[in-house]
Amino acid sequence: MRPQAVLILLPPACHHGGRIPLGFPMFQPIIIQGGMGVATSGWRLARAVSQLGQLGVVSGTLLAVVLARRLQEGDPNGLMRHALAHLPFSQVAERVIDTYYVEGGKPVDAPYRPVSMPGQFPSQALTELTVAANFTEVFLAKEGHQGRVGINLLEKIQAAALASIYGAMLAGVDYVLMGAGIPRSIPGVLDRFAEGKAAELKLDVEDNAAGPEAPMSFDPSTLQAGPLPTLTRPQFLAIVSSAALATTLAKKSNGRVDGFIIEGDIAGGHNAPPRGPMQLTPAGEPIYGPRDVPELAKFRDLGLPFWLAGGYATPEKLAEARQLGAAGVQVGTPFAFCEESGITDDLKRQACQMSLDGTAHVFTDPCASPTGFPFKVMRMPGSLSEPGIYTQRQRVCDLGYLRQSYRRPDGTLGYRCAAEPVDEFVRKGGTADGTDKRQCLCNGLLATVGLGQARPTGEFPIVTAGNDVANISRYIAPGATSYTAADVIRYMLAPVAQG
């Protein structure tokens, strides 16, 4: 039996003095499905959640690479080409297919054709591929139903943001979610694209306090001559960990912020660093304290809807969040291992069995991510988190989405990544210590969804999950070995047992 869709016009605990503020979204999901990994939250998962009346979210991370590799796999079900046939810029779609599609798929042991790295001035080919990829993912997530779909982007991946947002808006994305930074300029970008205008962002340049700005721009008119499609501005939800950041975004962004997702330190993926000096437990995990607990009263005072994230995937925690004034909750980890998730079936089965056995747990790694943010990894055999596995991998940065820009002595911009070869990082002004234990998340997360690059040394998956991965067995029926997105939603929306 399918759970009924849930649409509510105004959360009962929202503090607006009875008024609906300007831009307040009339659709209020109780459950937001987290945008996870690289294609973990793919179009299939987002569509399944959206069809059940909640907010399905696709991950916008590395979608250009994902589309290019799916086409090189031969697009066996034809869905990538089906979506591209609906791209308003037909010549762009044709160029993408001509460049990457391989009839019948590439040989298993042949490497994927490379995609150029993003930067301040991306090639026209990369811009077109990025627009097409984000359009494709959102189009497939939204096709055939009236539910709402969002896209999750990382502020850290600035160089791909403009083309990603435009491609998603072309497909009618309803929400844009962004965290891992301070996305003050994104609301204005949404406004500009909805007005049919070019938009600009400033690329963060490391150690560049006195140097010139590094603007990036995207003009939709470069995709096609003549009139552009009319676009609708999506709602913008900022993913934050503190009321201070939320207040800054609400009051100082260059456009309208429509709400917040408040992530705690037990959520999966990248976590905000602890406030104050970094201190570690004896096991090597960051220590979070009272200063890291979000002040919900201040969020309520902002008068905007918010959702709580990190360990809220039970009816009791959902009810608690609503009592605290939240419109609902964001849930990631339970969806990451459901049947519709993009993670390979072997890894999902392994995670489910580990939860059933009581051996599933995650480690908040302060060093794994090249960004410097703590990153949660699930300890799984055969993955990068297994001791000794990472040293087997050839150290290479050939995708570049987490590279940091820096100013060379001659004033030009360069790019470096703490997960690239150590000598290259040092040659670019980095320190050898800064590369210690850094892992290539771009390649690892692609391997997690079965799109890892073919190399002599192989590419190993890296599985990120929140602390709640220990409890995903709650969604598995007796005698079963897997569960669906509908099982998660049905469980969460069940009445709370009265004690």
Image (spheres, helix red, strand yellow):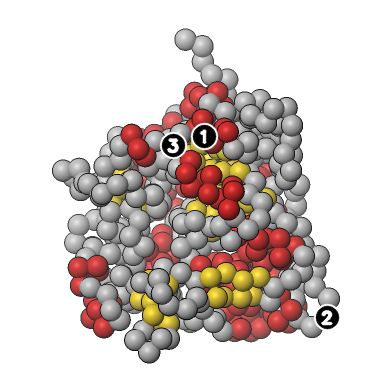
Residue at position x 16%, y 43% from top?
A: 282
Question: Residue 294 got which mark?
Answer: 3
**Disc 1 to disc 3, how far (Cα)?**
9 Å
Question: Residue 226 got which mark?
Answer: 2
Q: For the residues labelled 2 and 3, say whether their Cβ atoms are less than 8 Å apart.
A: no
Foreground: 108 or 381? 381
Left/right of residue 274 with respect to residue 426 in the rendered view = right
Amino acid type indicated by mark 3: Pro
The residue that label 1 is drawn on is 298
**Residue 261 shows in this picture:** yes
Residue 196 location (% of width, % of height): 77, 69
Q: For the residues labelled 1 and 2, say whether their Cβ atoms are less than 8 Å apart.
A: no
Amino acid type indicated by mark 2: Gly
Residue 208 location (% of width, % of height): 39, 73
Residue at position x 79%, y 83% from top?
A: 225
Residue 266 location (% of width, % of height): 37, 40
